[in-house]
Image: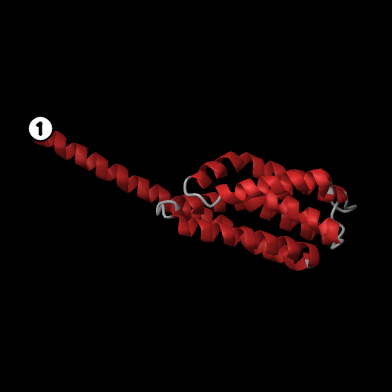
């Protein structure tokens, strides 16, 4: 069950911040917290993950830059989560690497979709305070979820299940709202154009 908890927690959290997840798994190895695969504790892996987390830490807090960063990571986060899932599952006799990769990637994509959609809405108000606050909350949540996955894997699985359902519902709702807003803008533009055309005639 421990591997399942780490798989679920790291998979979903990777959709929010892949590099922080990788770094924290390395910290868990170094501290001997859990049976996390030792590869995450390698010095080179932790240095790269730490550097990329530092870059994301800054980029994720700047309005519009965070949108471009999220767009670039639409593929990177699920793929990275899949790699983490395959490694974690490979150390478990009850989970196959392919299954672990698929589950982790799917969870990461779910979390990423919710994160990216939320950031698009937040950036309709371009002041930086909300971006910074949300980004810090995300980082703290990722850290909390990884600690939970390592120390209390059963609880982590339940939490991830709730988060996955909530994230899916939030993404669907936000995109419905976006479509309605687009229709209103297009309708207003079309109506204005028709009015001008009638006036010219």
Q: Give the x, y percent position of residue 105.
A: 69, 46
63 sits to left or right of 153: left
Residue 105, can we see it?
A: no
Q: Nearer the viewer, residue 38 or 132?
A: 132
Where residue 74 sits, quadrant-wise, is: top right
The residue at the point 18 percent across, 37 percent down is 194
Residue drawn at point x = 50 percent, y = 52 percent: 119
> 88 above or below 193?
below
Residue farthest to the top, as pictured? 201
**Residue 21 located left or right of residue 73:** right
Residue 148, x across and y down, in percent:
74, 65
- Left or right: 65 as drawn, with respect to 112: left
Q: Position of residue 198 (x, y in %)?
A: 12, 36
**Residue with the mark numbered 1:** 200
Which color scheme does this rendered protein use? Answer: secondary structure
User: Where the C terminus falls, by quadrant?
Assistant: top left
In the displayed image of the protein, which residue is found farthest to the right?
Answer: 93
- Crowd rating for badge 1 (residues with CA inside 10 Å; few <14, some 14–19, many 20+): few
């Amino acid at each position: 069950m421990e591997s399942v908890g780490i798989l679920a927690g790291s998979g979903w959290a990777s959709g929010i911040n892949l590099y922080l997840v990788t770094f924290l798994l390395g910290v868990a190895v170094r501290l001997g917290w859990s049976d996390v695969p030792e590869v995450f504790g390698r010095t080179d892996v932790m240095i790269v993950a730490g550097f990329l987390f530092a870059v994301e830490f800054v980029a994720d807090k700047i309005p519009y830059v965070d949108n471009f960063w999220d767009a670039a990571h639409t593929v990177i986060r699920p793929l990275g989560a899949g790699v983490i899932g395959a490694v974690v599952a490979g150390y478990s006799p009850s989970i196959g690497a392919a299954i672990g990769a698929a589950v982790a990637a799917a969870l990461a994509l779910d979390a990423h979709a919710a994160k990216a959609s939320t950031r698009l809405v937040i950036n309709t108000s371009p002041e930086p305070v909300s971006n910074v606050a949300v980004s810090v909350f995300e980082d703290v949540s990722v850290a909390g979820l990884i600690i939970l996955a390592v120390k209390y894997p059963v609880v982590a699985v339940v939490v991830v299940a709730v988060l996955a359902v909530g994230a899916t519902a939030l993404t669907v709702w936000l995109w419905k709202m976006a479509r309605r807003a687009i229709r209103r803008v297009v309708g207003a533009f079309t109506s204005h154009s028709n009015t001008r055309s009638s006036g010219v005639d």
